[in-house]
Amino acid sequence: MLYRTLGKTGLEVSEVGLGTSKGLVERLSREEGERLVARALDLGVNFIDTARHYGRGEAEARVGAAMRGRRDSVFICTKGGTIAGGGRSFARESLLRSMDVSLQTLGTDYVDVYLLHMAGPSAVKPGSEPTETLLELKESGKARFIGASVDGSGVWPALANDALDVLEITFNLADLYVAEEGFLDAAVEKEVGLVVKEPLAVANFYRSAPYPAWVAHLWERLQYYDFLRDESEMSAAEIALRFVLGEPRIHTAVPGTSRVEHLEANVALSDGTPLPETFARQIRDCYRKAVAAVG
Ligand SMILES: NC(=O)c1ccc[n+]([C@@H]2O[C@H](COP(=O)([O-])OP(=O)(O)OC[C@H]3O[C@@H](n4cnc5c(N)ncnc54)[C@H](OP(=O)(O)O)[C@@H]3O)[C@@H](O)[C@H]2O)c1
């Protein structure tokens, strides 16, 4: 496993982390989920991305159980602000309570990174109530570093807020916004830690219909990536993850999985071998065609 410095936090994070939002809680029993997280830690993954909201607390519970006895060698990134029944609240009281429940569920007294979950521009404004609450959590020692998970053009207001140490962004073979619009260069300039969510484009290259609906745009774009269907040289999943890991300006990618063999395959890709340029070029070409056709 190769490690990268997470921007100004100085944390040495595994370039392949683990995402815990879906498969881990939806397809596995609690025991199986704990075993999968523990296996990831055994393989050198040290950055686990979770959230209060994932599986209504079940993801944090599984992560917490898996890291018992080895808290010091794991970086936990969790998020607050989404509330039961849907919707968001970044109000001070709500975030403070959410953090306390996360700590209790994870079985720890601090998290390494605490993020506003799916934050809009007003939440990430300097001096906003959510920003001030994050700073309060940092000051208290409950969060070592703070930031936000943001999407699309929403990455820019977050980057403008100097209080934020880490941003969680989308970057994958079907979503090149951060690379093409100059965001990655700007983030390097500000030494912001970058965590990549959905690095496999939610495996939409393996689906015959868009699912889940909120990532349908990725599925629609991937219909223009014909070369991914020929897996004789490299699987679509490998092409996708190697493409993200080949980007030196990001620090850790957090693929989600419910299968130990997929976890092991993903970790094995952290070998410093770049994606062959023929694939990288096809990705860029297909992306342009797809965006022109379906947005
Ligand atoms: N902050 C936010 O708002 C936000 C939003 C979305 C995601 N996230 C974070 O980002 C993480 C990753 O996103 P994601 O899970 O939605 O999407 P993803 O990592 O792009 O894709 C996950 C999908 O890829 C499949 N997969 C994983 N490894 C594979 C392999 N080697 N070969 C074939 N298929 C493979 C998984 O299926 P199997 O289970 O069969 O392996 C799953 O269907 C989440 O778990 C979460 O931590 C954060």
Image: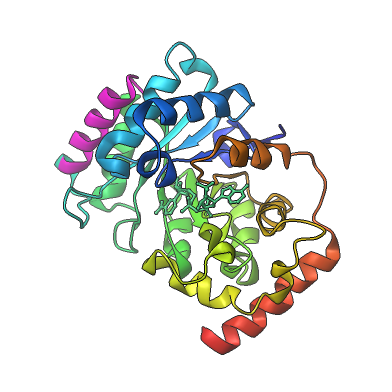
7 is higher (above) or lower (below) than 38: below
Give the image location of residue 25, x and y in percent. 36, 40
Residue shown at the point (25%, 41%) measured from the top left: 56
Q: Give the prevailing secondary structure in the magenta stretch.
A: helix
Q: Residue furthest bottom?
A: 293
Left or right of residue 64: residue 105: left
Residues 265 and 3: in front is 265
Give the image location of residue 244, x and y in percent. 66, 54
Residue shown at the point (56%, 29%) measured from the top left: 40
Instruction: Say if the magenta span includes residue 212.
Output: no
Left or right of residue 83: residue 11: right
Give the image location of residue 19, x and y in percent. 48, 42
Q: Which residues are magenta?
A: 94-110
Residue shown at the point (62%, 44%) measured from the top left: 251
Give the image location of residue 273, x and y in percent. 83, 46
User: How many labels, in total?
Assistant: 0
Residue shown at the point (65%, 84%) measured from the top left: 289
Residues 115 and 28: in front is 28
The quadrant in which the N terminus is found is top right
Left or right of residue 155: residue 227: right
Instruction: Say if the magenta span includes residue 99.
Output: yes
